[in-house]
Amino acid sequence: MLAVWVEQLLGFASGALKAIRRDERYPALMTWAREQGPALVGGNLPMAQALAPELWSQTPLERLGFACEPLARPGRNEPCWCATPAARPSSAAGRCACPVRCPTT
């Protein structure tokens, strides 16, 4: 089971890096993540959308002299990336709807 998961992650990372190198623009990566990414992680669209920003933030970009362009993480009282109306939750009742670990928790 672990070997399958690792193979899926490596396949996703490889595809994501190709998408990044092709355009070097974040919206193009997210389009790729929504359209092709789920097939590489067992059909899991939320996982593909959660992995793409992490890979983007750590990938050196040629257009920036091989520097990274990290994404800003939501602050303590800012809305979550998952687009739920809740800000960073202060209680279990206010939790966001992220399918994976929320960047604000």
Image: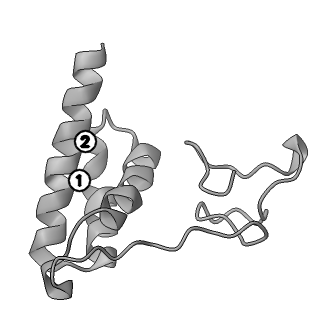
Residue extending farthest top: 1
In front: 5, or 63? Answer: 63
Q: Is residue 63 above or below residue 103?
A: below
Q: Is residue 12 above or below residue 18?
A: above
Instruction: Using the numbered discs, state the Cα–Cα distance from disc 1 to disc 2 in whole angstroms.
Output: 6 Å
Amino acid found under the numbered disc labelled 2: Ala
Q: Name the residue located 39 percent from the left edge and 39 percent from the top edge.
A: 44
- 10 Å neighbourhood of mark 1: few (<14), some, or many (≥20)? some
- In contact (CB < 8 Å): disc 1 and disc 2: yes
Question: For mark 1, what is the residue?
Answer: 36
Give x and y (percent) for residue 43: 33, 37
Nearer-the-camera pick, 77 or 60? 60
Image point (23%, 18%), residue name: 3
**Residue 91 at x, y percent in the picture:** 89, 46
Residue 69: which quarter of the image?
A: bottom left
Task: Residue 100 in the image: state x and y as whole percent.
Answer: 55, 42
Q: Who's the residue at 22% across and 45% down the image?
A: 12
Say whether residue 52 is left or right of residue 72. Answer: left
Tell me the amino acid under the disc marked 1. Gln
Query: What's the coloring here?
Result: one colour
Question: Residue under circle 2?
Answer: 39
Q: Is residue 19 left or right of residue 69?
A: left
- Vertical placement of 40 versus 71: above or below? above
Residue 98, disc: none
**SS class, disc 1:** loop
Count of picture labels? 2
